[in-house]
Image (cartoon, rainbow, N blue to C red):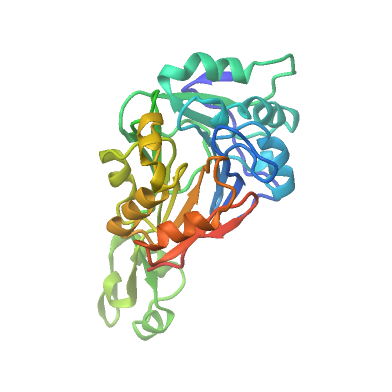
Amino acid sequence: MLHDDAGGVARRTAGHRTASRELVTLGTASQVPTRTRNHNGYALFWDDDVILFDPGEGTQRQMLYAGVSASALTRIALTHLHGDHSLGLAGVVQRISLDAVPQTVPVTFPESGRRWVEALCDATAYYHQERLVLQGLTRDGVVPRVPGELHGPTVLSTARLDHSLEAYGYRLDEPDGRRMDPARLAAAGVAGPDVGRLVREGELRTAGGTVRVEDVSDPRPGQSFAFVMDTRLCDAVWSLAEGVDMLVIESTFLDRDQGLARDHGHLTALQAATVAAQSGVRSLVLTHFSQRYPDPSEFEREARTVFDDELTVAADLDRVPLPRRR
């Protein structure tokens, strides 16, 4: 059942993972899969949300290997409609239908690729039980919520990249918050329902005077994540990456083939790592490797010339946790 920006009934599914933030790399090849690398596919676990990015061919089987359930998905996000980033959508959608996943699952994609998305969602005969909302992107900015969507307070936004056809990168930003200190709450005489009232209202009058939330808590910075696939260097790459805790970014080529990267609308490992270093990224995940390079350590050596923080040269079925809060 396809909807255009309309919702369905939603409820949390049994066995849905909670309190976890990690990336599962389902596939890490570029245009051509190899014996060791499947086409693209990335599942981001973010508390109660599970976002599937760029499901290339074979993603449904990779999900099985990785223990990623179709019933857990709360959004599918496509950067663009090249096959290595989207051909797996057909199988994933049919699995969502087969499992009778009850929640609304928005599918985000460049609006110019709508005819391909619709074809993939109805590629063969099956009994349609899925609750999909197709959200075509036409501009940079915050992705609207849809009725029935499972989500927390984190904001999803997009920015248009520079590829050979319309492509968008994604960014998640969790609002800053505060961590309550039990010892200071007890000293101030605040307990039970009064804690929630203090958080909501910012201050609380007690027998001992007025207690401000700042007096009994510490700042808790929100976490952030960016997903950048096929693109040349452009302003959007930098804005998406700025200050994020984790950046997942394509590095199709090594820098000795920078000309090929530019001609085909891609990045090199050096370019990706330079963006991460200059943007203050804490954890860098390189992926989307051309089959022309048999030795993945070359990507690490190149990235390490400019990037000193946490680095993952992704392999299929890796699990990469987000860094601890700052």
* Residue 248 horizontal/vertical position (percent): 46, 49
Q: Nearer the viewer, residue 264 or 130?
A: 264
The answer to whether 129 is drawn above or below residue 313 in the figure is above
Q: Residue at x 37, y 41 (%)?
A: 258
Left or right: residue 23 compared with residue 169: right
Report x, y in % for residue 148.
Answer: 53, 33
Classify the position of the N terminus by image quarter.
top right
Q: Is residue 262 above or below residue 65?
A: above
Quadrant position of residue 20: bottom right
Q: Quadrant of residue 304?
A: bottom left
Q: Is residue 235 visible?
A: yes
> What residue lies at 36% left-to-right and 58% top-to-bottom?
281
| Picture coordinates of residue 121, whole percent (x, y) | 61, 20
Q: Is residue 155 visible?
A: no
- Across the whole image, how many numbered discs are drawn on residues? 0
Residue positioned most to the front: 256
- For image coordinates 56% across by 16% down, the residue present is 118
Residue drawn at the location 67% of the way across and 39% of the way down? 70
Vertical position of residue 192 compared to residue 33: above or below: below
Q: Quadrant of the C terminus?
A: bottom left
Left/right of residue 237 with respect to residue 151 in the rendered view: left
Q: Is residue 138 left or right of residue 11?
A: left
The picture places residue 241, in percent across and down from the top left corner, at: 34, 49
Q: In front here: 229 or 213?
A: 229
